[in-house]
Image: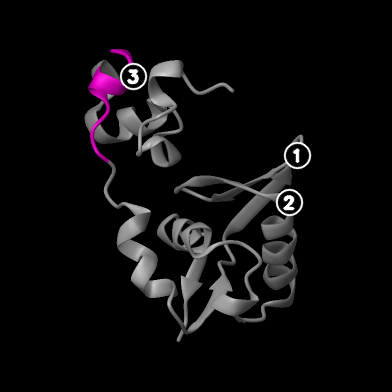
Amino acid sequence: SLIPVDCQQCKWVRWCEGGCRVYAKDLKGLDFMYKGSTENMPDPIEDYQKSLHLVSGGKFKVRHELRFREENGFWLFHIVGAWIAKVSTDNAKFLIRHYRSGHEFRVQDFPGSKESLADLLTKGIVEKVA
């Protein structure tokens, strides 16, 4: 793993990806960017746990601004100017299919967990439409 050892157990690692210097720069400026990792990283703006209630029903769609690429055993999804999300192959294939078709989907259609869908919602990869 490329995530620093002291970051691996942090509940915020899904956002900062282990002390992301770009994230730090955007929040605090260049000086902050070079000072280190965990003790210098602020809390993220939103925790996916706060989005769990949003995935209890309704329909979702994959954002059009999405970019994605396959890595070794997983996919990376990115919304321009926003989050990068590591996505399992099964979830990625589902998202790409819905991205290309433009079709909406329901929670029960999504192959991953509600937590995974809430994380994608928080990161802006998917959006709730109904």
Three-letter code for the amino acid on which mark 3 is drawn: Ser
**Horizontal and vertical percent for residue 54?**
38, 73
- 70 to 25, vertically: above or below: below
Residue beneath the point at 28% across and 13% down: 35
- Residue wearing tag 1: 73
Q: Nearer the viewer, residue 83 or 86?
A: 86
Are circles 3 and 2 on residues that touch, CB within 8 Å?
no
The residue segment tinted magenta is 32-43
In the visual, does 51 lie left or right of 66? left
Are circles 1 and 3 on residues that touch, CB within 8 Å?
no
Q: Earlier in the sequence, mark 1 or mark 3?
A: 3
- Residue wearing tag 2: 89
Q: Secondary structure at mark 3?
A: loop
Residue beneath the point at 50% across and 23% down: 3
Callout 3 crowding tier (Cα within 10 Å): few <14, some 14–19, many ≥20: some
User: Does 10 lie within the magenta span?
Assistant: no
**Horizontal and vertical percent for residue 41?**
27, 27
Residue 61: image tag: none
Asked where in the image residue 24 lies, by quadrant, the reply is top left
Distance between the alpha carbons at the discs numbered 2 and 1: 7 Å
Q: Secondary structure at mark 2?
A: helix
Three-letter code for the amino acid on which mark 2 is drawn: Thr
Callout 1 crowding tier (Cα within 10 Å): few <14, some 14–19, many ≥20: few
Distance between the alpha carbons at the discs numbered 3 and 2: 29 Å
- 46 to 44, vertically: above or below: below
Residue beneath the point at 44% across and 41% down: 14
- Name the quadrant of the N terminus: top right
Are circles 2 and 1 on residues that touch, CB within 8 Å?
yes
- Residue wearing tag 3: 37
Q: Secondary structure at mark 1?
A: loop
Distance between the alpha carbons at the discs numbered 1 and 3: 27 Å
Q: Earlier in the sequence, mark 3 or mark 2?
A: 3
